[in-house]
Image (cartoon, grey):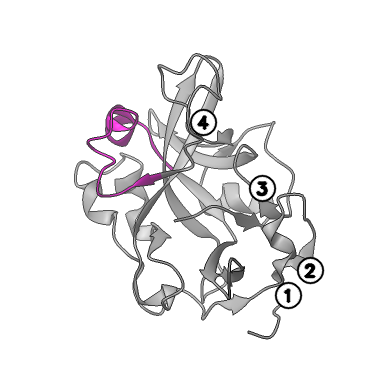
Amino acid sequence: MCGRFTITHPNAALAALFDAVPGNDLPVTPNFNVCPTNSVAVVTSEGGVRRLRAMRWGFIPAWYKAPNDGPLIINARSDTVAAKPAFKAAIRERRCIVPASGFYEWSAGEGKARLPWYFTRADGQPMALAGVWQRWRDLDTVAIVSTEAGPGMAGIHHREPVILERADWPLWLGEAGHGAATLMRPVAEGVLNRPWRVGVEVNSNRASGAGLIVPVAA
């Protein structure tokens, strides 16, 4: 799954990479601890125009009467996204990309300890995380699609975010016909760097700063 990530690439660089028109309300970068309910930059494609837009990370189904009317939905499982009432329309009509510089995942430690690890692409490029979005009243909200873990997760967790390669962006964004479901798979071996352990400070959603991604002894 994906419950926390970083975005250190500038918004202008992201807009250029995805060939998207940037909005004027994008969240400030860098952010080394992007948390659920934060505003995040999201790539959408509508009418043949890609846009880099701000959305709330935390998908709000249409029937919610308030943002906290039910569980906080930050991920959508690839195996059920097409069947779940919350996502059925979004996976067909409102797919998007959530750029990330890296993401955190936690493994089990001794007792109740949760040990954080940091993942990045081996080529240093931003990740393109598959997402689905929903407009709730006047608020655009997003969830990141997750799938079963591949070899790059190295046994740390049983789920991982769907990471799209550049050639697959048009298909996921609805610009290249049908078949986007085939993209909801684990990332190919070698795409991700070997993850490194980072300090437990990132376990707090109040933590910030570049020190969060500094390696510590495993």
Write down the quadrant of residue 61 in the picture: top left
Could you tell me which residue is drawn at 31 percent across and 39 percent down? 174
Badge 2 density bin: few <14, some 14–19, many ≥20, Cα 10 Å: few
Write down the quadrant of residue 49 in the picture: top left
Please name whichever residue, 36 or 90, is drawn nearer the observer in this view of the structure.
Answer: 36
User: Where does residue 56 sit, x and y in percent of width and height?
Assistant: 58, 33
Quadrant placement of the C terminus: bottom right
| Tag 1 residue | 214
| Tag 3 residue | 11
The reply to whether the C-beta atoms of the residues labelled 2 and 1 are less than 8 Å apart is: yes
| Tag 2 residue | 211
In whole angstroms, how far apart are the C-alphas of marks 1 and 4? 31 Å
In whole angstroms, how far apart are the C-alphas of marks 1 and 3? 23 Å
Q: Secondary structure at mark 2?
A: helix
Which stretch appears magenta?
Answer: 76-96
Three-letter amino acid code of the residue under disc 2: Gly
Q: Indicate left or right for 158 with 40 as reference.
A: left
Q: Secondary structure at mark 3?
A: helix
User: Where does residue 68 sit, x and y in percent of width and height?
Assistant: 56, 25
| Tag 4 residue | 141
Mark 4 and mark 2 lie on one chain; the one further toward the N terminus is: 4
The image shows residue 42, relative to residue 195, as above or below, that is above
Write down the quadrant of residue 17 in the picture: bottom right
Please say whether residue 202 is one of the residues in the magenta stretch.
Answer: no
Three-letter amino acid code of the residue under disc 1: Val
Mark 1 and mark 4 lie on one chain; the one further toward the N terminus is: 4
